[in-house]
Image (cartoon, rainbow, N blue to C red):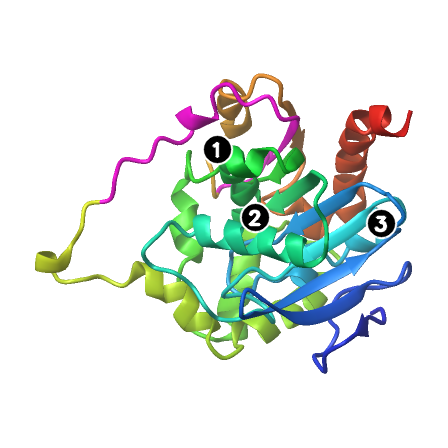
């Protein structure tokens, strides 16, 4: 387990070795926002890592094995999304789960003085956020590239996705959920410990369940049809789509289907389940690093 320099009193979980990763909690748009950061700040490309949306998801839980690798070369920012980790358990129920979190994410970047286009990297729900950001022209100009690992934007859901929706607070149930995310790996015990810490944090359970609360029929409102993924048509932002060969949470071949809307995207299929960034951090980072290195060549020429 590594040390984290922190400006709050929260405990470190999964980050190890060097370079040093800093944990900070600040108020952004009137909301407590925890984020991890590191790497060079003297003009290095900025890579923003967005964590998964499973129970107990957080920046350290999802990216603990990758952030130290990425920070050797890039400036890295990994926030806890609203409702998760050490960030405010504040959500909105009148808009999509993507919209308000994206607004808050870019408010954080403004707060940090990051105005140049950033590279977004997300796993699962975080990957879906990267794709949904591309559908917003106002945000698109602030995005240099997107990488999604098992995040489809909400389309092509698999039968097993419903099996990770409920949580009873027990370690046994959390282990079942992680079993859908990852194949067996050496850091499983540390992953379970870290994820449980955030899964039982006050407010997390309600934040996760509230969007699924049934309302009386007389109060039900029909939402407008979702144009996704059709509203990705014409987007030319560089993209990397990473699919797990043994991922049962989404349909096999989703990356190729998404590529029909993003023909410039590169696709990779890993020998993994849903979250190889957790179970195979070095192999996953090698793919992402190769992609980012290729598209940032011109910036460093």
In the depicted structure, whether residue 111 falls above or below residue 293:
below
Mark 2 closeness class: few <14, some 14–19, many ≥20 residues within 10 Å: many
Label 3 residue SS? helix
The picture places residue 152, in percent across and down from the top left corner, at: 50, 36
Label 2 residue SS? helix
The quadrant in which the C terminus is found is: top right
Residue at the spot x=68%, y=63% of the render? Answer: 35
Q: Earlier in the sequence, mark 3 or mark 1?
A: 3
Residue 239: say if magenta.
yes
Residue 66 seen in the figure = no
The quadrant in which the N terminus is found is: bottom right
The picture places residue 232, in percent across and down from the top left corner, at: 48, 26
Gap in angstroms between the C-alphas marked 2 and 3: 19 Å
Residue 271: say if magenta.
no
Quickly name the residue at label 2. Answer: 126
In the shown orientation, is residue 6 left or right of residue 32? right
Please tell me the numbered disc located at residue 178: none
Asked whether the beta carbons under mark 3 and mark 1 sit within 8 Å of each other, the answer is no
Prevalent SS, magenta region: loop
Quickly name the residue at label 1. Answer: 135
Gap in angstroms between the C-alphas marked 3 and 1: 30 Å
Quickly name the residue at label 3. Answer: 69
Q: Give the residues in magenta.
A: 223-248
Label 1 residue SS? loop
In the shown orientation, is residue 235 left or right of residue 188? left
Residue at the spot x=66%, y=53% of the render? Answer: 109
| Discs 3/1, front | 1
Asked whether the beta carbons under mark 2 and mark 1 sit within 8 Å of each other, the answer is no
What is the residue that sits farthest to the left in this orientation? Answer: 218
Residue 284 seen in the figure = yes
Gap in angstroms between the C-alphas marked 2 and 1: 15 Å
Q: Earlier in the sequence, mark 2 or mark 3?
A: 3
């Amino acid at each position: 387990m590594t040390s984290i320099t922190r400006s709050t009193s929260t405990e470190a979980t999964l980050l190890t070795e060097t370079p040093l990763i800093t944990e900070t909690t600040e108020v952004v748009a009137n909301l407590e926002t925890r984020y991890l950061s590191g790497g060079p700040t003297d003009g290095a490309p900025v890579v923003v890592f967005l964590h998964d949306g499973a129970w107990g998801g957080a920046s350290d839980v999802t990216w603990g094995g990758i952030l130290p690798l990425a920070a050797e070369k890039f400036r890295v920012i990994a926030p806890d999304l609203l409702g998760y980790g050490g960030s405010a358990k504040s959500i909105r129920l009148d808009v999509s789960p993507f919209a308000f979190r994206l607004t808050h994410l870019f408010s954080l970047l403004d707060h940090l003085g990051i105005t140049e286009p950033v590279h977004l990297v997300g796993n699962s729900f975080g990957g879906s956020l990267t794709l949904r950001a591309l559908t917003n022209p106002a945000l698109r100009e602030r995005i240099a590239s997107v990488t999604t690992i098992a995040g489809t934007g909400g389309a092509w859901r698999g039968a097993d996705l419903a099996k990770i929706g409920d949580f009873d607070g027990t370690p046994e149930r959390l282990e079942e959920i992680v079993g859908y995310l990852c194949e067996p790996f050496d850091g499983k015990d540390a992953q379970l410990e870290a994820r449980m810490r955030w899964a039982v944090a006050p407010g997390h359970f309600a934040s996760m369940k509230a969007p699924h609360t049934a309302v009386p029929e007389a109060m039900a409102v029909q939402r407008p049809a979702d144009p996704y993924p059709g509203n990705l048509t014409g987007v030319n932002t560089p993209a990397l789509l990473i699919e797990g060969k043994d991922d049962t949470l989404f349909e096999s071949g989703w990356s190729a289907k998404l590529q029909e809307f993003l023909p410039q995207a590169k696709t990779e299929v890993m020998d993994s389940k849903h979250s190889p960034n957790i179970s195979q951090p070095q192999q996953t980072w090698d793919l992402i690093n190769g992609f980012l290195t290729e598209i940032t060549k011109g910036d460093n020429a």
